[in-house]
Amino acid sequence: MEKQVKTKQRVADHGEVFTAEREVKAMCDLVNQETERVDSRFLEPACGDGNFLAEILKRKLQSSQMKRYKRSPYDWERNSLLALGSIYGVDMLIDNCISCRERLYSIWNAEYKKVCKKECNDETRTSAKFILELNIVCGNALTLMCVDESAQDSDEPIVFSEWSFPRNDAFIYRKDYTFDELVNAEEKPKKKKNDSQITLFIDDEPSVDEGGKFIQEYKCHYRLLGKSDKAV
């Protein structure tokens, strides 16, 4: 059984208590249909070392949707990266963020080796690590700002990336948004549906703020993330 508390001091300083595995599984069961959708997005605003996110990733990678891609390493790679890209976490403690990234990568890589075997390659592994580096953020979900090593707010806003394969080819697209824009989008005037941009955590009837702006958009071959991604 995993510990729910690392130290009493961390509980006193940060209120850090991890959710037990039984409760994690029970809560995920309530939205099981969504956890098995490769592109269904989840955000854990106090992710710790990833109890919820790890369970969600396991369900995505073992879903019937992913099983259809087992005969094609190319299709499995792309969709497994899409599954990774659909999972987001924020935590104020850097050691938790690092542990969470490593934990999710280990789950993904174990399944990768199991499915793709000799077709596995280090380029795709590097892309998986790059996605996790951007998706698991050391920050304060209440102030929507990144934090420093002392868990104090910095001047840098939390930024999340939306990952997609809009053309169903080898090129993965990344759109960066500030967390503030995503959280507060519904409080601002909305544009007509035909003029709107799809935002990060809205899949149906998308609508955005009046400006409809994101920070930047990039695209590159899915095996070259972080190496040759170019602004669009």
Image (tube, grey):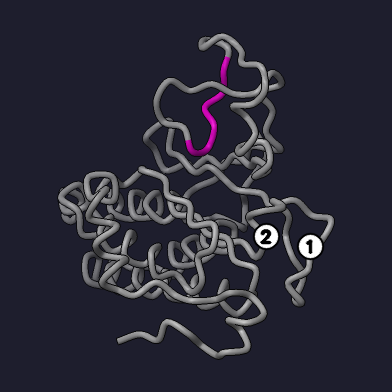
Residue beneath the point at 28% across and 45% down: 34
Under mark 2, the amino acid is: Asn
52 to the left or right of 46 = left
Residue drawn where x is 24% and y is 50% of the image: 30
Q: Secondary structure at mark 2?
A: strand
Q: Is residue 16 left or right of residue 81?
A: right
Q: Position of residue 62 (x, y in %)?
A: 20, 59
Q: Residues within 10 Å of mark 1 (few under 14, many from 20)?
A: some
Q: Is residue 138 above or below residue 189?
A: below
Mark 1 or mark 2: which comes first in sequence? 2
Residue 139 visible here: yes
Q: Quadrant of the N terminus?
A: bottom left
Image quarter of the C terminus: top right
Residue 118 visible in rendering: no
Residue 14 forms part of the magenta stretch: no
Give SS at disc 1.
strand
Q: Main secondary structure of the magenta part?
A: loop
Above or below: residue 198 compared with residue 28: above
Residues shaded magenta? 196-201
Residue 55 is labelled as none
Residue beneath disc 1: 153
> Could you tell me if the residues under marks 1 and 2 are in contact, i.e. CB atoms within 8 Å?
yes
- Image position, residue 90 (x, y; %): 58, 60
Give the CA separation, mark 1 to mark 2: 7 Å
Outermost residue toward the right?
Answer: 155
Residue 17, position as x, y percentages in the image: 49, 76
Residue at 65%, 34% in the rendered image? 184
Q: Quadrant of residue 93?
A: bottom right
Q: Nearer the viewer, residue 89 or 216?
A: 89
- Which circle marks residue 140 in the picture? 2
Dot 2: within a 10 Å radius of its alpha carbon, few (fewer than 14), some, or many (20 or more) residues? many
